[in-house]
Amino acid sequence: MTSRREALKRLTQASALGLVAAPFMNDLMAQSAFAADGTAPRADGPAPAAAIKRCGVQLYTIRGEMEKGVEAALVRVAAIGFKEVEFAGYFGRTPTQIAAALKANGLTAPSLHIPVAMILKDPNAMLDSMETIGHKFAIMPYLDANERKTLDQYKKVADQLNEAGALTKKRGIQMAYHNHDFEFETLEGEVPYDLFLARCDKDLVHFELDLFWANKAKRDPLAYFAKHPGRFPCVHVKDMTADGTMTEVGAGRIPFAQYFAKASQAGIKHYYVEHDNPKDPYASITASFKALSAL
């Protein structure tokens, strides 16, 4: 199975060689989250129900199955009941092949994970691929450790997101950023995630709030929804046990229903279940689909 760092290296090499159309996304799956420790207190009070009509899945969860065969994996995903998927790699398929596989299974792919540097390197090629597949969100998935040592580095990334956002907006695609927990750690007297929200143009850059990692960092998503309404069109939905372990939706203690009751305020349109390292990928997304659908 491809590791995140291996995929980043391949993507960088491919970009340097100008291989940025169909092959550029082959291994991007590894850009998603990885494990840490800690937990956040569960909110008290009643949890209002939220109507989620189109459940989605981040395909990083089943990356091993995607490596075996994209088409077969999408058949399984659709059979579970998902209507939306979020890509983080095309595994050698062209955008046209991906679009055909989605259509054949009644799926759409509103978003994908892609390094902002790749968009800036060859925006036309990147955006052409996104348009072919039907992506509406281009989401920066992760910052490697050497990209986030200083606050100035975070500022640079924010500026890059703004630059890319201006380019994607011209094609009807929204730039966004996906968090882990490290963005919430105070650095040089500031919280990088808050810096992103302040420095990124609210019309050019939105955010995909990963609810697990926000809870891991002991941050309250409701507070962010209230302070920055409409800036969170996508969310990652994965649960957390009392000891801070990642688990399937419904098997942990994160109060999703309370969060989703504020979906209109937050601007949430797309809900993606995910598990970084499930024992059984299909069993994991099936359990999470059932729990999310019941909210």
Image (cartoon, helix red, strand yellow):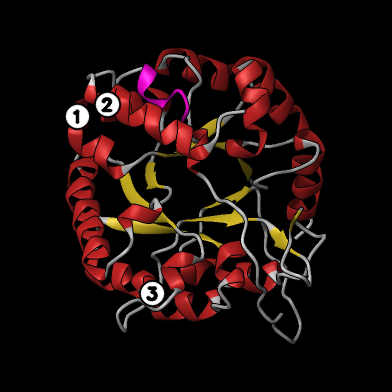
Q: Earlier in the sequence, mark 3 or mark 2?
A: 2
Q: From where the camera sits, is residue 171 visible?
A: no
Q: Which residue is mark 1?
A: 122
The residue tagged with tag 2: helix, strand or loop? helix
Horizontal placement of 124 versus 10: left or right? left
Q: Is residue 41 above or below residue 37?
A: below
Separation of residues labelled 3 and 1 (CA atoms): 31 Å
- Identify residue for label 2: 15
User: Could you classify mark 2 by the number of other residues whose Cα lies within 10 Å: few (under 14), some (14-19), or many (20 or more)?
Assistant: some
Under mark 1, the amino acid is Asp
Which amino acid lies under the numbered mark 2 shown in the image of this protein?
Ser
Q: Is residue 25 magenta?
A: yes
Q: Seen from this angle, which residue lies furthest bottom?
A: 45
Res 158 label: none
Which residue is depicted at the point 19% across and 33% down? 121
Q: Are marks 3 and 1 in contact (CB under 8 Å)?
A: no
CB-based contact (under 8 Å), mark 2 and mark 1: yes
Marks 2 and 1, the one that precedes in the sequence: 2
- Few, some or many C-alpha atoms within 10 Å of disc 1 (few <14, some 14-19, many ≥20)? some
Q: Quickly name the residue at label 3.
A: 228
What is the quadrant of residue 247 in the picture?
bottom right
Q: Which residues are magenta?
A: 23-27
Query: Which image quarter: residue 231?
Result: bottom left
Residue drawn 28% across the image and 40% down it? 172
- In three-dimensional space, the C-alpha distance between marks 3 and 2, rounded to whole angstroms, equals 34 Å
Is 40 within the magenta?
no
